[in-house]
């Protein structure tokens, strides 16, 4: 894999990243979505890397601060589900999950869970269901 430092002065991207389609609006919308851009853009990946960023913490890439992006802000019809694994009486393992539909759904064919562990992204847009129309847009 080669890194491209010249295409964008604010970002480092993988060489051969897909070009944005100017003819097909739906395809361009899908390509410009964060769920697709983080795969080849270091700035987009760093923006979702931490769930909550402490006040004194900053990420700087190529001389500019990376703005944090909360994926939950891109959702509509939010549901907050309290999840407690059945591993024992330890209540510290309980978490509140946020589930919803992408605001751009169903035009954007993106679905999956973003799994964070100790405030750090470990599995971005993890597919938990088959790729069919019923799960399109569920994040």
Image: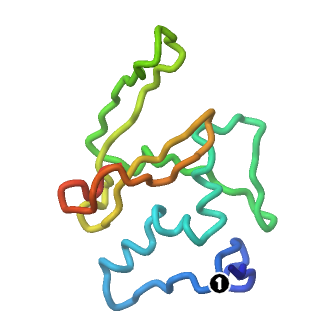
* Residue at far bottom of view: 23
Q: Is residue 57 above or below residue 16?
A: above
Q: Position of residue 54 (x, y in %)?
A: 70, 34
Local packing at callout 1 (Cα closer than 10 Å; few below 14, some 14-19, many 20+) is some
Residue 65 image point, x, y percent: 73, 57
- The residue that label 1 is drawn on is 15
Q: Find residue 36 and report its horizontal and vertical position in percent.
A: 47, 68
Instruction: Determine whether the residue tagged by mark 1 lies in a helix, strand or loop.
Output: loop
Task: Indicate whether 58 appears above or below 24.
Answer: above
Q: Which residue in the rendered view is the most extreme toward the top?
A: 89
Q: Residue at x 30, y 77 (%)?
A: 26
The residue sitting at the right extreme is 63
User: How does the figure colour the protein chain or chains?
Assistant: rainbow
Q: In the displayed structure, does residue 80 sit left or right of residue 41? A: left
Residue drawn at (72%, 35%) of the image: 55
Name the quadrant containing residue 17: bottom right
Residue 108 in the image: above or below residue 15: above
Name the residue located 34 percent from the left edge and 40 percent from the top edge.
Answer: 99
Relative depth, front residue between 12 and 94? 94
**Residue depicted at 34% across the width and 30% down the height:** 80
**85 or 138, nearer to the observer:** 85
Q: How many marks?
A: 1
Q: Quadrant of residue 15?
A: bottom right
Residue 107 relative to residue 94: left or right: left
- Placement of 111 over or under 18, stated as above or below: above
Q: 17 left or right of 107? A: right
Q: Residue furthest left?
A: 134
Pick the front one: 104 or 93:
93
Q: Quadrant of the N terminus?
A: bottom right
Residue 9 screen position, x and y as percent? 73, 78
């Amino acid at each position: 894999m080669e890194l491209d430092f010249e295409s964008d002065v604010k970002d480092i991207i993988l060489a051969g990243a897909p070009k944005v389609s100017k003819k097909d609006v739906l395809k361009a919308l899908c390509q410009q979505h964060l769920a697709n851009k983080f795969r080849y853009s270091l700035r987009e990946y760093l923006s979702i890397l931490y769930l909550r960023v402490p006040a004194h913490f900053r990420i700087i890439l190529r001389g500019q601060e990376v703005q944090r992006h909360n994926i939950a802000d891109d959702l509509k019809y939010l549901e907050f589900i309290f999840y407690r694994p059945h591993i024992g009486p330890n209540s510290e393992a309980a978490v509140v999950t946020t589930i919803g539909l992408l605001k751009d759904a169903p035009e954007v064919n993106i679905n999956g869970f973003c799994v964070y562990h100790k405030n750090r992204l470990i599995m971005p847009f993890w597919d938990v269901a088959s790729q069919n129309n019923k799960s399109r847009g569920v994040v």
